[in-house]
Amino acid sequence: MQAPLPISALLSLTFGVHIVLVNLDMAIATFIPLMEWLARRRNDDFLMERAKVLMRYYASTYAIAGVFGTAFTVMLLSFYPQFIGLAGHLTWVPFGLAILMIALRFLTIVLYWYLWDRSSPQTHLAVGGLMALSGYLIPFGFRAVFAFLNVPSGLHLEPKPYLDVVGALMNPTFLPLYLKSVFGALAAGSLMMVTVYVMRYEVSEGSIRERYLELVSRFADYGFASLALMMFFGAWYSVSLVTTPYKFYNIFGSLIGKPGERDFGWLFIVKMILVLVQFIVLYQVFRPKELTATQISWAKIGGPVALATVLVGEMLNMHSQLPYFVAQPEVVNSLPEIFKQALLTTNANTLANLPELYTITVIFLIPLLAAVVALFYLLLKDR
Amino acid sequence: MDPFSLIQQWFSGYPAGWERLLSMIGIEVHWFILQYVLGLSFLAVVAEAIWLRTGNDDWKRLSRTLAKAFVAVFAVGAATGTASEFGLVLLWPNLTEAAGRYIYFPLYMEIFAFLMEGIFIYMYFYAEDKVSPRTHLIIGILAFVGAWFSGAMILSVNSFMQAPVNVIAHYNPLVGPSSWAPPDVLLFVPAQIAQALDVNKLAAVGAKVINATPEQVTVTLPSGLVRVLMREAFAGKTIGESTLAAVIKPEALQSLSSVPLKTVIDAIVANTVKNAGTFMITFLSKGYLATYVHALGAALTVSAFTLLGGYALRLLRTSKDDKDRSYFLRAIKFAAVVAFILIAIQGTGSGHAMGAAVAKYNPEKFAAMEATTSQIVSLPGMLGMKQLVEQFMPLMAYGDPNAKLPSYDVISPEYRPPLIIHYLYYTKIGLGVLLGLIGLLAVFYAFRKKEWPSWVLWIAVISPAIAQITSFLGWGVREMGRKPWAIYGIMDVQTELTINPPPAWQLMGVALYLTLILVVLVLAVYWFLWRR
């Protein structure tokens, strides 16, 4: 009993691109106002320029993350309309919060970018602070929904299906999932900064080179702290998944001798290896005086590996509960038929699960993905 | 009816008043911004093309300014689009589910349009100094084509909701008001289901068999029955509990009684969609082309008048010896010409086509727009032009001076749209005419060799607001006039609504929040573009 492969692939692709970019964006949107604040406090032109360059990159790419998020939602709607319909009836508060924060985030990004040097430093930093804060509140809503898909806490079926919000927030998997995601994003962003500034360090000379080394060192510290916290909350999240045995055993079953219906233990091991590589990278660049060629090579893979960790983690979380949208088969099977059908990924929209649609998708998506690469290339060219 | 009663009829006369109000505000905030993405991107490319042809740097400067503006608003437009999308899911989940199941294709294609728009808009703005001028122009073309492509997809869904291809409106303008009847819905019933239905009982409820093949039976059902069946299906009733039970053969009912009604309705609607063409069904909606051209025209018109207003403000704030003045004069001349051409096309071309489509495919809405009722005094009546309009309108709407307009009072109450749309419609027409006059005045002064008088510039400054209000009223008439339907002839407002409606204070809180975001955005863009 599997979801159709093309649907699974398309949802994984769009969600994967979206989640990697939003993790990166969340971290960068925190670093930029922080760098601006430090630059103003220290009257540091170098740091201010780095913040501006980072913002220039960020201002031009964050919408791409949003576009892939929309693509994922619309694909979900096209392939699983009943699920989206059911979710709509129940999730006004968590999705509503996320929506309000998305609108605030986009507005603050525009304001922060366009009002740089056109408003007072205090106003600009306040907007930057709001920009960073909204980044943490968006996943608060979305992760509440993801936690609900682990354990449907707060769901009542009588007299009609509704969601008790307090009950939903009491979900045992919500807090560790949210905190793990936040620190995972900060770790990935920090590691990416390490990679970017090592590359600048490599081609710079003199005092500028030293400044880049300082940035590498500083972001390595942030990365280490965030990664350690992510490991802690990740372990908590793993333990919390015992409340949803189907998913727990699909992930950890083969590792503890009690295999689940589908084995994703291998993907968990891949993730742990990637985390280990990140720790090695951070160890290599921990408060260095100079960087050797070996250290530079390690640092260059830090960012991509960190983003791959995010991707693998999300895929693990997503696929380990399939074919159920709510990872508790006993709950799904006890529901009225109309709800049960909505919660199975095997029950894809027959009007959309068509080879012609997949052909159209390939024809449009491949050139557009190439155009995304071209956009990133043009943005980073000569910088 | 007094104004309060008119508002009350719209708000309380149909279900979910607060939810409709929030949707209206949310989508209008999105549309307010979106029009600039559709319009300014095109105008920026036109200006750049003129620069490439003439070499005059004023055009390049104008193109850059427009690019700055639409890039700034694109991001927030995308965010409000996401908010609207989630808003539809959360407030109208049954409608969303039906759209995802049966008419998903344009929404799906919009993914690619949105991606195209996003990539090339940013590339146009950020990569200017990294590609050749001609490549940059091509990127600009791809940017506005992406935005227009996106609009084409979304508007096809909206057109389907207004006038689905398989819904037949009943009104004969040559016979007159007595020919009105509720719309019928054409359905292709799979043979397996058709066999369980009692033909005589079906005929008694107004169904007509059009055709029968071994695979399917083509029937028309009265929209009143379809509306009830849709409501029962989404409420989770079984066949035994539903209205359908009354037309099922007794021997079949025994085995089908506990089957969810939604399963049967889904099989019929899915088969109907396949017959119309899964990928084509929304594009075949009646009036789609007119809708698209008129809506895109509105976006371009609003953008052009905003340009006119923006440069009028610049001229008012600069002295006569300002070094930038010749650039401002060139820009305002461009804006004036484009604005005038567009408003003329909107009024006489696409607007007319849109009105004729409404008259033909949504006679109930048309009756409300024209206020063919004794319940209210029409605006033309107040202005002493009632007779003139009554003589003129049949020719305009049906191309025949002997045609007769549908009577609002003859329409059964459960099929009547709110009468407030009459006033909105005629206000919109009036504002459209006013915009035409402003455009004409601007063109006159643009081509005169003398200075623009300040009173003309001030009129130009307020013209963007008039254009936005006109555009908003157009959508207001279209969407409010869709009531009592969510999808004309098929699904009503009650059926589309969430089973857990949020409290009114939360809905209004969200509406205020979105409005505030729009206000801040407008101020920020103004600050960014015009403050030095």
Image (cartoon, helix red, strand yellow):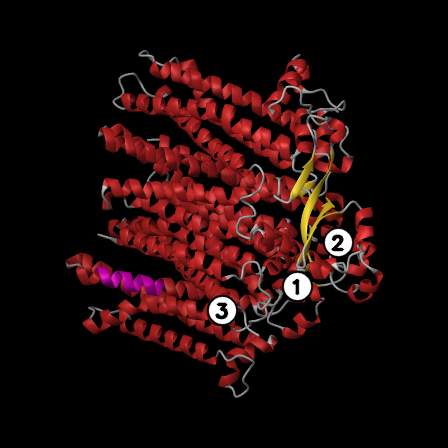
| Dominant secondary structure of the residues highlighted in magenta in the image | helix
Report whether mark 3 lies on the same chain as mark 1.
yes
Please provide the residue range marked out in magenta: A190-200
User: Do the residues bearing badges 3 and 1 touch, measured as CB atoms within 8 Å?
Assistant: no
Q: Residue at x 66, y 42 (%)?
A: B167
Residue at mark 3: chain:
A
Which residue is more in the foreground, B138 or A197? B138
Choose top left, top right, bottom left or bottom right for residue B305. Answer: top left
Q: Residue at x 65, y 55 (%)?
A: A89
- Disc 3 to disc 1, C-alpha distance: 35 Å
- Disc 2 to disc 3, C-alpha distance: 34 Å
Crowding near pointer 3: few (<14 within 10 Å), some, many (20+)?
few
Mark 3 or mark 1, earlier in chain: 3
Marks 2, 1: nearer the viewer: 2
For mark 2, what is the residue? B232
Residue closest to the far right? B250
**Which type of secondary structure does the marked residue at label 3 adopt?**
helix
Position of B5 compared to B101: left or right?
A: right
Position of B353 compared to B454: left or right?
A: right
The circle drawn on residue A5 is 3
Which residue is more in the foreground, B12 or B339? B339
Residue at mark 1: chain:
A
Task: Report if residue A114 lies within the magenta region.
Answer: no
**Dot 1 amino acid type:** Gly
For mark 1, what is the residue? A167
**Dot 2 amino acid type:** Glu
**Dot 3 amino acid type:** Leu
Whether residue B125 is visible: no
**In this rendering, is residue B196 above or below A299?**
above
Which residue is more in the foreground, B500 or A75? A75
**Which type of secondary structure does the marked residue at label 1 adopt?**
helix
**In this rendering, is residue A214 above or below B110?**
below
